[in-house]
Amino acid sequence: MFVILAIVAGIAGTIFMSVVMWFIHERRWANADMIRAVGSMVTKRYDNALVPGLLLHIAAGCIFGLIYLYIMRATGITNWFVLMQIGLAIGTMHGAAMVFILMAMAEKHPVEQFRVAGPAVGWAHVIGHMAYGTGVGLAVGLIGPHIGELTKSVTLPS
């Protein structure tokens, strides 16, 4: 059940993040078309990058869902609101770390429009990851207790 909850929570977080990033991009606050940016890393073109980018984004969301769920379960907290806040905190740190990776990769991006990643793009990714963490925490908090996943003990490495 752990893996199923992590996948569901990861997909929920990915949806939250995608909507926030789309909103930021559509408002032209930043070049935050992350799904096409990720997809065009594979396709080397913007016009056919949506589907590969979406698939890669969902896959990454599910993988990171495992990490987020492990941390949340290790706290022993089962309150949905507190788990949502924990997800927000993890997402904030995750987003801040991703900014460095984004900046390093941007200048080598195969599509020219994604080669410039200034402060607005960085902030968009931090906010997007905050939305991801909030979505994961909300899903874990609302679904986890119903499948008994959050009440299991966690063995942390010593």
Image (spheres, rainbow, N blue to C red):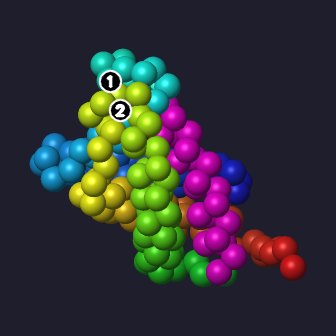
Q: Which mark is residue 46?
A: 1
**Residue 104: % across, % down:** 47, 50
Q: Earlier in the sequence, mark 2 or mark 1?
A: 2
| Cα distance in 3D space between marks 2 and 1 | 7 Å
Q: Which mark is residue 106?
A: none
Residue sitting at 56 percent across and 39 percent down? 59
Q: Which mark is residue 36?
A: 2
72 drawn magenta: yes
Q: Look at the picture and state if 20 lies above or below 144.
A: above
Q: Is residue 54 visible?
A: no
Question: Does the residue at mark 2 contact the one at mark 1 (Cβ under 8 Å)?
Answer: yes
In the rendered structure, the answer to whether residue 155 lies left or right of residue 88 reads right
* Quadrant in which residue 96 is drawn: bottom left
Q: Is residue 105 visible?
A: yes
What kind of element bears circle 1?
loop
What kind of element bears circle 2?
helix
Residue sitting at 16 percent across and 43 percent down? 26
In the rendered structure, the answer to whether residue 153 lies left or right of residue 28 reads right
Q: Look at the picture and state if 146 lies above or below 5.
A: below
For badge 2, the amino acid type reads Arg
In the rendered structure, the answer to whether residue 63 lies left or right of residue 11 reads right
**Residue 139: % across, % down:** 49, 60
**Residue 110: % across, % down:** 41, 28
The stretch in magenta equals 54-75
Of residues 45 and 89, the one drawn nearer to the viewer in this rendering: 45
Q: Quadrant of the C terminus?
A: bottom right
